[in-house]
Amino acid sequence: MNISVHLHTILQRQTPEGPVGRVDVCLPEGSTVADLLEHLEVALEPDALLLVVNGRMAELQQTLQEGDQVNLMPAISGGAPGAGALALDIL
């Protein structure tokens, strides 16, 4: 089955022509989101990713279907240490 995968930010593939943010993948019937991550050799841990299938949040065990649109995004976290305390002091 064919799946369209949109790779965001650091997950994009580097090629001589530049970064590639969308790839089409052919997987066996019954494949899951976890199988897709393995196939793509995604280096991030699954809990560090936002997994979206057809516009809805997905779990690793979700079975994919022909023509699914998958978005893989690194989860965002961070901020400067102590920035929250500074903001509260300003208020």
Image (cartoon, grey):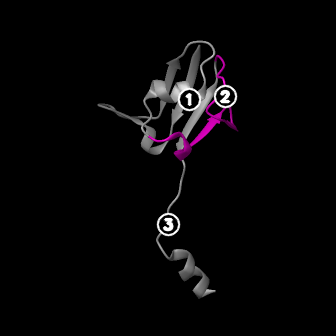
Q: Residue at x 59, y 87 (%)?
A: 90
Determine the CA span between mark 1 and mark 3: 29 Å
Residue 18 occupies which quadrant of the picture?
top left
The mark nearer the N terminus, 1 or 3, is 1
Element class at badge 2: loop
x and y percent of residue 19 in the render? Answer: 38, 36
Residue 86 occupies which quadrant of the picture?
bottom right
Specify the quadrant that holds the C terminus. Answer: bottom right
x and y percent of residue 1 in the render? Answer: 59, 13
Mark 3 vs mark 2: give the one in front: 2
Q: In the rendered structure, which amino acid carries the disc numbered 3?
A: Gly
Q: Which residue is mark 1?
A: 34
What span is colored magenta in the figure? 44-66
**Mark number displayed over residue 9:** none
**Mark number displayed over residue 62:** 2
Q: Which residue is mark 3?
A: 79
Q: In the rendered structure, which amino acid carries the disc numbered 1?
A: Ala
Determine the CA span between mark 2 and mark 1: 8 Å
Q: Is residue 59 left or right of residue 86?
A: right
Nearest to the observer: residue 15 or residue 3: 3
Q: Residue at x 46, y 44 (%)?
A: 9
The mark nearer the N terminus, 3 or 2, is 2
